[in-house]
Image: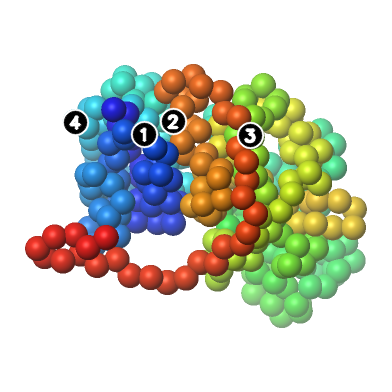
Amino acid sequence: MKRVLVSGASGIVGYGVLRALRQAGQAIFLVGTSIYDDSVAPAFCDVFEQAPLTGTPEYLDWLLATLRRHRIDLLVPGIEIDMYHWVDHIPQIRATGALPLLNEPSLIALCKDKWGFYQHLQAVGVTCAIKSSLEQDFATLVAQFGLPFLLKPRRGFGSKGIVRVTSEAVFQSYRADIGTVLMAQPIVGNDEEEFTISAFCDASGGYFASMALRRKLSHDGFTDKAEVVDSAEFGPAIDELCRLLRPLGPTNFQFRRCVQGPKLLEINPRISSSTAIRTAFGYNESAMALDYFLDQRVPVQPAIRRGRAVRYTDEHIFYDDGLHL
């Protein structure tokens, strides 16, 4: 029986991974962790462990002890901060007998700062990169990007913290943060033409399988509604990015469709928030990762069922005398 730990199990990525692994048709012992003791996480795993905050002095010792106690084979980051923490401690994690599901360390480092990532793409002439700037002069940015334009956090994920600049007054409220915290970008495409593509990459410049969704975002920056679409139009851009960056394992590419072709919003070098939706349509990247990294079985492109997904609020009930599923 394979034994898997998933962090951030109280969040949409974490419990999405747990649910996907439950549907993999294999005997898997699942450990879910979260800093919260009152979340939905215990509903989706065999054992729940409450974690200290990532990055605190006691976190690493707690993690290593938990991996040893449960004899974990594979650990999957369900939150971004864990990915960044684990990549700095791979030898200690591997010493427990567990394998962390992490992308290429150089890509993880590159994606941590969107400005540095943009500079790297620009330097090598990637055509799908969106023009970005650290300029602090309003008139210069309007001349370059038009109005409105965006101020986007250099660090972070989803659409959290993005400011839509519609006037100089709005701009001046954030001007001091441009450069250190924020960077400027034009608005490309529109909200109806945003796409999230997952590819299972081979670290050699290619990928084994992929799936594309047209999506609409929630206010929290996660996929709220999605429709399965053909990924062919994004193939050349993903091919170019894979040749350059050589990702490994589950990798998420986000694009806007434009007249000039797809433009890259960002790369998440990990399993993303749409993973449960992808699994429902036949693309179970968590199961692929289990097979590939533990059993060296190469993923194949699955048949993708067509349709659409809508997320909604639901409840999970925990009775004192038992668990209601």
**Residue at image mark 4:** 69
Q: Residue at x 51, y 41 (%)?
A: 284
Q: Are marks 4 and 3 in contact (CB under 8 Å)?
A: no
Residue type indicated by callout 4: Arg
Which tag, 2 or 3, sits closer to the chain's start?
Answer: 2
- Of pointers 1 and 2, the one earlier in the residue sequence: 1
Q: Which mark is residue 58?
A: none
Report, in whole angstroms, how far the alpha carbon at label 4 lies from the one at label 2. 20 Å
Q: Name the mark nearer the viewer: 2 or 3.
A: 3
Whether 322 is drawn above or below 24: the answer is below
**Circle 1 residues within 10 Å: few <14, some 14–19, many ≥20:** few
Between marks 1 and 3, how big is the CA–CA gap? Answer: 19 Å
In three-dimensional space, the C-alpha distance between marks 4 and 3, rounded to whole angstroms, equals 36 Å
Between disc 4 and disc 3, whose residue precedes? 4
Pointers 1 and 2 in contact (CB under 8 A)?
yes
Residue 26: which numbered mark, if any?
1
Please indicate, yes or no, whether residue 17 appears anywhere in the rendered image: no
Gap between marks 1 and 2 measured at Cα: 10 Å
Residue drawn 39% across the image and 26% down it:
99
The residue to which callout 3 is attached is 301
* Quarter of the figure that contains the N terminus: top left
